[in-house]
Image (tube, grey):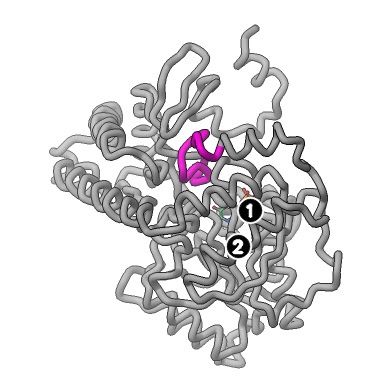
Amino acid sequence: MDLMKAITDHESVVRSYVRNFPAVFEKARGSWLYDVDGNAYLDFFAGASVLNYGHNHPELKEALLDYISGDNITHSLDMASVARAEFLEAFDRLILQPRGMNYKVQFPGPAGNNAVEAALKIARKVKGREKIMSFTNAFHGMTLGALSITGNSFKRQGAGLPLTHSDSMPYSNYFGPEHNTIEYIDRMLQDSGSGMDLPAAAVVETVQAEGGVNVAADEWLRGLQDICRKYDIMLIVDDIQTGNGRCGKFFSFEEAGIDPDVVTVSKSISGYGLPLALTLLKPEHDIWEPGEHNGTFRGHNLAFVTARRTLELFWADDTLEQDIARRSSMIEKRLLEMVRKYPEAEGTPRGRGMMQAIEFGNKELAGKTSAVAFKKRLIIETAGPDDEVLKLLPPLTTSDEDLVKGLDIIEDSLVEAMRELGITKKAASE
Ligand SMILES: *Cc1c(COP(=O)(O)O)cnc(C)c1O
């Protein structure tokens, strides 16, 4: 059987990543994927940060297999189950309490966009207002509410109807570092002639992952929180891709020291690639009627089992955080070296924690580098409105040795991609 043909013949043309990484994958372990021909690929994409702890972590797998073989309950809607209770207890004990946080946990449905939709609904319900403040180059998912606060015009037009009830404001550094967009937003809200309605909430990513790895300054995030408090607007942090340790701490906003009203969490929360999403709410905003936001897969027991085990394995002490800090600086240093060594690439490195990236002068260079890297068996994605940013998302558990291996492949691929695109030192100095 031609496996790829079965996919191209029968699956909708909407399919996407399979086009950039055209192999049929069969097995995976840690930071490595294996295709049906037995080729090994180093994974610097990690399911868009769903696999922060690598593929098929042996201890998570064991917890899952034990749970299944013991005939423990798999599906129970939101009826009480041991797995659900144990996850909630562990999340409170290992994540919320040590950080002095007080949130109620809502299970809105299995995907990130479910967490975003629930966040928008509760903000509108609490504040009794319709508008949501979003940001340039934001990405929050593909359902209508999430799309209405997403920047990318290609994704937005897929909605097929007007996306309303949101206002897009300039993100941190949108006009460069010399412009303070917080002042602009403040003025828009304060001026009764600005044409801007008071929103129920502002929804923000601390690093815009899909939008091109745009990093918000800590000061900007604090400024946004001040504005939200000044105008009685709820602050929602979408931590779906930036959370779960990706940017250094469990929550990406810990270093900025902000205290969001609502936090959306998904992607790596199950630790194993099983779908799970959380919408974290301050107790005073938890004003749902029972069943008002319902759904079939709101918290799945198999995901609860691996999620709890993940918290115990990786978040009971600061070993992982220290590893992330060391690996982040390894990546940062190497990317800086690369952009200095190849000035003709006109590269700008940026990122936070283990979400690092390079934006190139030539918008085709990131995509070309990713394509060459795939031939060299490294999986690495692009981001940004024109896919002009090469984005590194290795599992947080990637060994230092594999990290160096991947960075070497990136450098080789960049050199080859520049050659293919005719980008030379001479052209850059013209
Ligand atoms: C992936 C992502 C989402 C959407 O999650 P889905 O599971 O694809 O619905 C929302 N916000 C951010 C920041 C994301 O990275």
Q: Quadrant of residue 151?
A: bottom right
Task: Identify the disc placed on residue 112.
Answer: 1
Q: Left or right: where does residue 238 sit relative to residue 106?
A: left
Real-space Cα distance between discs 2 and 1? 8 Å
- From this viewpoint, is residue 97 visible? yes
| Quadrant the C terminus occupies | top left
| Residues shaded magenta | 47-60
Disc 2 and disc 1 in contact, CB within 8 angstroms: yes
Q: Look at mark 2 in the image and give the residue it sits on.
A: 264
Which badge, 2 or 1, is on the more N-terminal residue? Answer: 1
Q: As shown in the figure, which amino acid type bears the numbered disc 1? A: Gly
Q: As shown in the figure, which amino acid type bears the numbered disc 2? A: Thr
Number of other residues with Cα within 10 Å of mark 1, as a class: few under 14, some 14 to 19, many 20 or more: many
Work out whether 121 lies above or below 277.
Answer: below
Does dot 1 land on a helix, a strand or a loop? helix
> Residue at left 40%, top 73%?
256
Percent of width and height locating residue 145: 71, 61
